[in-house]
Structures are given as structure tokens and as C-alpha cells.
Image (cartoon, helix red, strand yellow):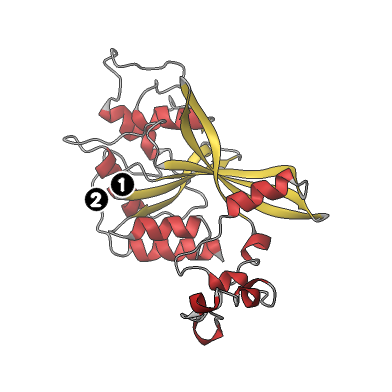
Amino acid sequence: MRKLAVIIILFLTSIELAPGQGLYSPGSPQDDGRFAASTKQVNQFFRRFNGEESADGTKRYYEDDSNYRNRELRGKFISILFDNETSGIQNNLKTEFMKDVLSEPLPQYLAFHRGEWFAEVATTFIYKGKRENVTLFMKLQPEGLGYEWVVDRVSFAPFKNLFKKPQGDQKSFLHPMSHEIGFMNLRKAFQDNKLPEAYTPKEYEPDYLTLFLYEVKSGNLKFDNISDVKFHFFQINDWYFELNQFNRPGFNTGWLISNLIKLKPGDKEVVQKFIYDQN
């Protein structure tokens, strides 16, 4: 269902776009055999996207090098950083993205420590004797003289089912004159009612991460395995893209952009809620 929703978003986005102009046509890179076939590491994806390594991947470019962030080199690299076999991202959308990224007056780059990107890690845990899927959302934060990855959010179906706040006429409530009886009717909220969340503010949202950590510390949730890792990027102005790893024969392999959306005002929050499974 989530994959279908992403496809729908991409379709609705792409039909509003006009083809842009880029240095190269995505999907048919001008690599003349010099480009290494696979972007093997996420850090290498950053370097290639920014034009900070040689075409064959053997040399790093730094600020004092004339090839550092060369626009033509970046154009060649970015054109081969899309998943061209399974994602279905339309060429006109890729071209418009490249046009924005490679803009001569205001080029855009990725920065490892700038935020606005995070990891989604699909894991399994043993919960009450049963293997369950748990999605961890990881972000980088400063720590001492460097940085560290931390768990920022968690999505776990059994937790979501714990909190089903009723709405409208189905919602229990404490009478506005409850203070006059010393809130004695709190017994109704916490002893006689199976949905105590009904008595919380409208803006209340359960803290699933705290609940997750409590269950881990209590021994009720035990780590089992990691099944997949992907990354979500919002660093490029007005764009979102997803980065996945593809292990397959051929040249279109490694860490590649598998999802691309042109963002209109308000879209960023919608996409983030979808990623975090908050819909």
C-alpha cells in the first residue's frame, strides 16, 4: 500500500512538470567507459553527486583542485545516480532536478553534516515470543568532536494499536465542573475505562520511541535482525529523493536515487508524515 501511494504521488507530481534542460539525458549517461559501474558506498554517492572524485573513482578532489565540483563532471555523475531499471522516475523529472542542482548561478550540493537527511532501517525484533517488524529512523547529531547516529523515531504496528483515541460522540470526557468534586471522577478515566487516552489533549501524540526503549529495557523487545536500509533526502531546495542500494548485474547498480518528488509548498510535511507512517 505504501509503495502504491508513492507511485501515485510521483505520477501526480510528474504530470505537472514541463521538461527541463540539463547537461546530459538521465538514463543514458555520457560515461565513455571511464565511470565505475557501482556507487558502492553512501559516502561515495555524496562525492559523486557533488563532483568530488575522479570519473574512475580512484581519486578524491579537494577545494584546491581545479576539478573540484566541476559542473560537467557533476552532470555526468548525477545522470548515472538514478535507478533506471525499476523506479519508473520520468526523464523530464530527472532533467528538471539536474537543472536545479547544476544551476550555474546557484548550484546545490549535498552535505553530510547539514541535516535534512536521515536513514530508515527496517529491522525485526522478538516481541512476546513473535518476530515483529520494527522501523527505526536514524539521524546524525553532533557528539564531542564528531558526530554519531542516533535513533530519532520508531514505527511499530503493535504500539500504534495501543492508542486509538476515540473521536466525537464516541469520546469519553471529564465534565467541565469536575474540579468542584475534587476530580473524583478520575476513577472513571483510569479504572473503568480501557481508553485512558480519551482524556488527553487534542494535540496529544504517543511517544512511541520512549515506549520502545522501555520495552527493550524491560526485556520484552529483543533485537533480531536488519533487513533493509534506505535514506531520505530533503537537502535540495524544493526536492525530495530516496536513496536505495541495488545489488544486481550491469552498470546501473549500487546506491541510487529510487524515488524523486518535486515539492510544492506544504508537500515536505506531507511526505515526511508518510515516511514516518503517521497517516
Q: Position of residue 8 (x, y in %)?
A: 44, 66
- In the structure shown, which secondary structural element does the residue marked by tag 2 occupy? loop
Any part of residue 32 in sight: no
Whether 63 is drawn above or below 206: the answer is above
Q: Earlier in the sequence, mark 2 or mark 1?
A: 2
Residue type at numbered disc 1: Phe
Q: Position of residue 255 (x, y in %)?
A: 51, 37
Who is closer to the viewer here, 50 or 37?
A: 50
Q: Which quarter of the figure has residue 30? A: top left
Local packing at callout 2 (Cα closer than 10 Å; few below 14, some 14-19, many 20+) is some
Give the CA separation, mark 2 to mark 1. 8 Å
Any part of residue 163 in sight: yes
Q: Quadrant of the N terminus?
A: bottom right
Who is closer to the viewer here, 88 or 229?
A: 229
Give the label on residue 232, or none: none
Residue that numbered label 1 is attached to: 97
Give the residue drawn at x 26%, y 54%.
19
Q: Nearer the viewer, mark 2 or mark 1?
A: 1
Give the residue drawn at x 59%, y 55%.
208
Give the residue drawn at x 41%, y 17%.
60
Q: Position of residue 135 (x, y in %)?
A: 61, 50
Whether 108 is drawn above or below 241: the answer is above
Q: Which quarter of the figure has residue 46? A: top left
Give the label on residue 20, or none: 2
- In the structure shown, which secondary structural element does the residue marked by tag 1 occupy? helix
Whether 56 is drawn above or below 13: the answer is above
Residue type at numbered disc 2: Gly
Local packing at callout 1 (Cα closer than 10 Å; few below 14, some 14-19, many 20+) is many
| Side of 248 where 260 appears, left or right | left
Q: Are marks 2 and 1 in contact (CB under 8 Å)?
A: yes
Whether 167 is drawn above or below 124: the answer is below
